[in-house]
DNA sequence: CTGAAAGCGCTTACAG
DNA sequence: CTGAAAGCGCTTACAG
């Protein structure tokens, strides 16, 4: 037999309505408050969440929809969002569509029919406007990582890293070390995010009068698909590049997956870093720092992204749309490690 | 205005009880079934989950409690559990206690008061018997990765990797390559799991008549604490070992964290693998394969662990305790890569 | 198999 | 500020 609000009402001699007011932090007499608190403690009462939700028509549930849960990279986002909403006694449901767009649509329908109070999602590319489905259902949504093409017609809150700045930081570093024969390993042309990283990177060189037309490839970019495939294609691409006459002195990996592919090529081909080629990467990864030649990179603040997205979402859930739509930009950090050779002094890169 | 079961009842001319029976897959007349299905589709009705839960006194919620959510390693477990329970329309709540045992206890209380239908948890060490709190509350629980000391007195279902076999596989490999001056980098003496890995490893050498007393260290094991600290202590330990007179020809890392620490020492000290020292590891990690010298290791089937734990938990939720308690053992796989030198032929390790 | 009625444990207007 | 009553959208015995 569970303790219910009725038991508290009976014990205190008050009505259930008053107990409910106490539970919902509404004004009640001080003496009643004390009495209720004492009784709740004594009977070890906890409100039945399901009943509260049914009556109040809320669900206190947040959905977080990612591309790939098996991919560790997004963990800090899941963590920071979960952590944020735990404080408000929200349940966070984590879902992933694994690059299956039919599945994405199914999951979205599921979340809508579950009546989630809000959603944080990662668009799969710049054409992804699925967030509209949530908006149509009256559910606030914040998108992460990508800016999408439909932003103008269908406004939405978004949180992204300062991709342009990150690209520029890496370019500046390479420039200082004397590199100008560079190859950019892109992942997908359909990503605003990747584009910004490349633009930030090339602008630095262009401003110094370098010919950046050779940086990007005549080869098609590595398509945006599931994790393992990006890695193996990145590996193949890396080899093609290094086999050319006059190979680049430095390669810019535009994200962590393509970097993993490239790195695996350096291993099996016994290509030495930074002696044979210098590497920089947009994104960091635990093991990038423990590699044979720790990778110089720009790291995203993934926890920061998750937390900022949560804050914005919470604000919308509470009905505050005064600054809608927001496009929050989270700062990135540069980590100089050991994968860039100094062509000017002939020595290999600084270690902070 | 939302469509409710009453609308379906009115439209079909049936009672809400009958509609409810349909929804719960109980026997109703075929003609009514057809009529109801047609009406549900026409009105685009979806049952209100909260109301169902309130009335039926279930929550359809599973808790999964890990040590560290920021740590990517466990992601496949989260994924596989979520994926499994999604099929049954359960919501999975992911929590972590971050090696804070007071927090662990708080979270457990939270989950209990949320009335979860079942829990999958990772004990923090072999003394952790917190699972009892769930059992006392009548909530089925399955533990992962560790076998705990209290198993005899307080039985519980558990799912673990075949740690003994994995340790033996690595030992056999080193033996075949001619290694016998070996150092074992342990993480914690309070872990049944680590013990089994070491036992599997040393038994192979002992059977061949080797003196295994030197394998383990006079140094205290690296304590079980939060991620970054294990890595930095692993790094320090690795250095101590390699600076000794007559350093080992091979090191066995007993888990991925300690391996990360050791690997980071090889980088900064420019210690070459496998020329200077051979390495094997129990656990795999995405980047272990793309390192300069891809690490020979034994990989756990983390998804398999998560799925098996889910299956057992589901069985218990459905009230079937016929085979309680279970201790499911999940197979591990050996991956020969490039971190072991062949002392017999003088060449470095096989690649596959 | 079906239906009328009660009730899950709360919150919500509405009087007082 | 407090309380009596209704009701959130279902499921559950219980008759029929």
Image (cartoon, coloured by chain):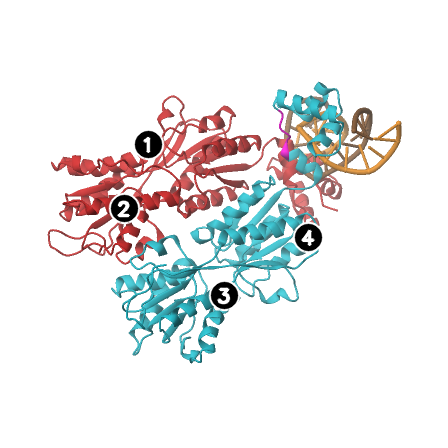
Chain colours: A red, B cyan, C brown, D orange
Tell me if mark 3 has few (under 14), some (14-19) or many (20+) residues whose alpha carbon lies within 10 angstroms of its own.
many
Tag 4 subunit = B
Q: Is residue B26 left or right of residue A89?
A: right
| Residue at the extreme front | B345
CA gap between label 4 and label 1 equals 51 Å
Pinpoint the chain carrying mark 3. Answer: B
Residue A3 at x, y percent in the picture? 72, 45
Quadrant in the rendering for residue A56: top right
Q: Residue at x 58, y 40 (%)?
A: B87
- Residue at mark 4 shares a chain with residue at mark 3: yes
For mark 3, give the secondary structure.
helix
Mark 2 and mark 4: span between their CA atoms? 50 Å
Disc marking residue B103 = none
Disc nearer the start of the sequence (2/1): 1
Q: Secondary structure at mark 2?
A: strand
B338 part of magenta stretch: no
Rounded to the nearest angstrom, the CA distance separating label 1 from label 3 is 46 Å
Task: Give the residue number, with chain letter if any, for mark 4.
Answer: B138
- Camera-side mark, 4 or 3: 3
Q: In the rendered image, which quarter is residue D2 located in? A: top right
State the separation of the CA atoms marked 2 and 1: 19 Å
Badge 3 is on which residue?
Answer: B165
Residue under numbered circle 2: A281
Quarter-of-image position of residue A268: bottom left
* Crowd around label 2: few <14 · some 14–19 · many ≥20 (10 Å): many
Q: Secondary structure at mark 1?
A: loop
| Residue A270 horizontal/vertical position (percent) | 24, 56
Q: Residues within 10 Å of mark 1 (few under 14, many from 20)?
A: some
Label 2 marks a residue whose chain is A
Residue A94: x, y in percent?
50, 41
Question: Mark 4: which secondary structure?
Answer: loop
Q: How far apart are the two marked residues, 3 and 2, measured between alpha carbons?
A: 38 Å
């Amino acid at each position: 037999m569970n303790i219910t609000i009725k038991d508290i009402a009976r014990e205190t001699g008050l009505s259930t309505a008053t107990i409910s007011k106490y539970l919902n932090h509404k004004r009640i007499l001080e003496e009643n408050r004390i009495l209720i608190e004492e009784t709740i403690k004594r009977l070890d009462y906890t409100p039945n969440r399901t009943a509260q939700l049914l009556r109040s028509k809320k669900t206190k549930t947040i959905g977080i929809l990612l591309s790939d849960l098996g991919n560790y990279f997004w963990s800090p986002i899941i963590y920071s969002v979960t952590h944020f909403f735990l404080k408000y006694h929200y349940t966070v449901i984590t879902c992933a569509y694994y690059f299956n767009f039919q599945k994405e649509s199914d999951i979205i329908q599921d979340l809508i029919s579950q009546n989630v109070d809000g959603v944080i999602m990662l668009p799969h590319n710049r054409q992804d406007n699925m967030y509209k489905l949530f908006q149509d259902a009256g559910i606030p949504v914040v998108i992460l990582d990508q800016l999408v093409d439909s932003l103008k017609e269908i406004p939405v809150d978004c949180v992204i890293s300062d991709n342009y700045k990150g690209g520029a930081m890496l370019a500046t570093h390479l420039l200082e070390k004397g590199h100008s024969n560079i190859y950019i390993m892109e992942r997908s042309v359909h990503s605003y995010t990747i584009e910004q990283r490349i633009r930030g990177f090339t602008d630095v060189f262009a401003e110094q009068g370098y010919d950046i037309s050779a940086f990007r490839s005549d080869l098609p970019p590595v398509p945006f698909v599931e994790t393992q495939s990006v890695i193996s294609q990145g590996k193949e691409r890396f080899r093609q590049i290094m086999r050319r006459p006059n190979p680049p002195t430095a390669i810019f990996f535009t994200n962590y997956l393509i970097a993993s592919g490239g790195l695996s090529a350096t291993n099996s081909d016994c290509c030495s870093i930074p002696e044979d080629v210098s590497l920089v990467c947009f994104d960091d990864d635990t093991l990038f720092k423990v590699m044979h030649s720790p990778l110089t990179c720009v790291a995203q603040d993934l926890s920061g992204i998750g937390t900022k997205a949560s804050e914005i979402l919470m604000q919308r859930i509470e009905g505050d749309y005064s600054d809608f739509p927001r496009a929050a930009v989270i700062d990135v950090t540069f980590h100089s490690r050991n994968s860039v050779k100094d062509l000017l002094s002939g020595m290999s890169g600084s270690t902070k």
